[in-house]
Image (cartoon, rainbow, N blue to C red):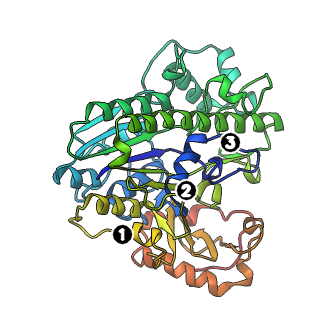
Amino acid sequence: MNIVLVVFDSLRRDCMGCYGPPPWWEVKTPHFDALAEESLVMTRMYPESLPTLPTRRALYTGQRVYPFFNGDFHLKGDFVGAPGWGPIQEDRDTVAELLRDSGYRTGLVADVYHMFKPSKNFTRGFNQWMFLRGQETDPYRSGPAPTQEQIDHWLPKELQNPGKVRFIRQCLMNMHDRIREEDYFNARVLIEASRWLEQNRDAEKFLLVVESFDPHEPWFVPEHYRRMYDDSDGPEQVVSGYANTDRLSPELVRRTQANYAGLVTMCDRWFGHLYETMQNLGMLENTALIFTTDHGHSIGDQNYMGKRGYPSVPEVYDVPLMIRHPGGVGAGKRSDMLVQHTDVAAQILEFAGVEPRQPLHGKAFWNAAVGDGEPIRDHVTVGWGSAMTVIDQNWWLNCKVNGKGVFLRDLNAEKPFESNVADDHPEVIKHLYDKGVEDAGGDFPEFVLKLAEGQADAPGCSDLAARE
């Protein structure tokens, strides 16, 4: 069986029609929705660790990254993005290596520039890999420098500071001369992925991993996509302040949501190109197509713009996962089984008939999900920085790894995230926290504990301490 894994970065699950809608309006995603009708759709899929690079370490290996032992990276040529923000360990096999060694031809097409920074090794195991340059602050171009007028158009005065101005200046240099829709990043990634499929039709079996950094910020998108959701004129807004939205007018919040929604619709359009290429090449009959993302993004939800691990929220942590089986198995079925990115890695190995050489945290779930079998796990633990989130069928616990600053959400409530019920359920907090500690191997690295001690408790948290 051939396998194509498509990963969009920062794609909110509720911004796909088959999962949505988000709080502001319905987002048009006809190709994603059509894939859902042909796929097993997982409704309770979560990351194993976050953000970008820790997620991909888990996805590419099937092994835990949380609680970030040996994860205090300070590498030349990169910033410290979060605990675990580094390369895949040398002693861990990647899915691509295992499949390549078992006779698969393996390919990677990506514009996620963090994967290609100095000292990173996410290309391991791929017979061919392609890095499409220019996202964010990738030093792709050194000129021409944008004018102050251009900077002011894309970055509102109320958000401007030296760091944000440097960011938007590099972004504008990187996208200079971009004229056609095909010049935009997600289009380029999906066009090149389609070309890889055309060029590798002679492979007996293949794995293709397609990594689109869109719809991650900055949310530059052709104007006609934005006008689908906001037809007004005026200044643009394409970045996150990673803070509350008090400094943004309602018009700028709406414009941000429109640019994000437009970029999601554009990703959908070019995903359709990849799907139609597979269809035209006759590959839908012999290829498993797996679709997911790393995380979502808050865009004005609860008056916040950005993403974070504490407090954790569904618009960031709820992840889409759809699997289209070439035999039509599971088409249109939905499963609420708890799964994580490590389980996707294990499932790819099972589809390929390849045994891992090392024990995996991930577990293959396909047969249980399509056959209404027993769940593969009764909870998931998600690590991000100094915080853990533990989720089971009924509860959502979020706190710092030292047990302080506790939030507990009752998932059976009508609006679970509008109230913190921690004070009413100390026994639930203790039970879930103990699960998170167990998943960490019983303890945490000293540098993560220091981060937790130095991080302020979030407003609205409980005074209860989960750790005794």
Closest to the observer, 218 or 362: 362
Q: Are marks 2 and 3 in contact (CB under 8 Å)?
A: no
Q: CA distance from mark 2 to mark 3?
A: 16 Å
Amino acid tagged 2: Val
The x and y percentages for residue 313 are 65, 60
The image position of residue 297, as x and y in percent, is 62, 48
Residue at screen point 62% across, 52% down:
18
- Write down the residue under mark 3: 27
Name the N-terminal-most of marks 3 and 1. 3
Residue closer to the observer: 69 or 102? 102
Q: Which residue is mark 2?
A: 319
The type of residue carrying mark 1 is His
Mark closer to the chain start, 1 or 2: 2
Q: Is residue 77 visible?
A: no
- Earlier-in-chain disc, 2 versus 3: 3
Q: Which residue: 41% across, 66% down?
A: 366
Query: Toward the viewer: 439 or 19?
Result: 19
Q: Amino acid at mark 3?
A: Val
**Secondary structure state at the residue bearing disc 1:** loop
> Where residue 20 sits: x, y (%)?
67, 52
Asked if residue 271 is positioned above or below residue 379 in the image, the reply reads: above
Task: Name, please, the residue furthest toward the right.
Answer: 250
Q: Nearer the viewer, mark 2 or mark 3?
A: 3
Give the secondary structure at mark 2: strand
Residue 119, image x and y in percent? 30, 42
Which residue has dot 1 on it? Answer: 361
Tell me what residue is drawn at x 68 percent, y 42 percent: 27
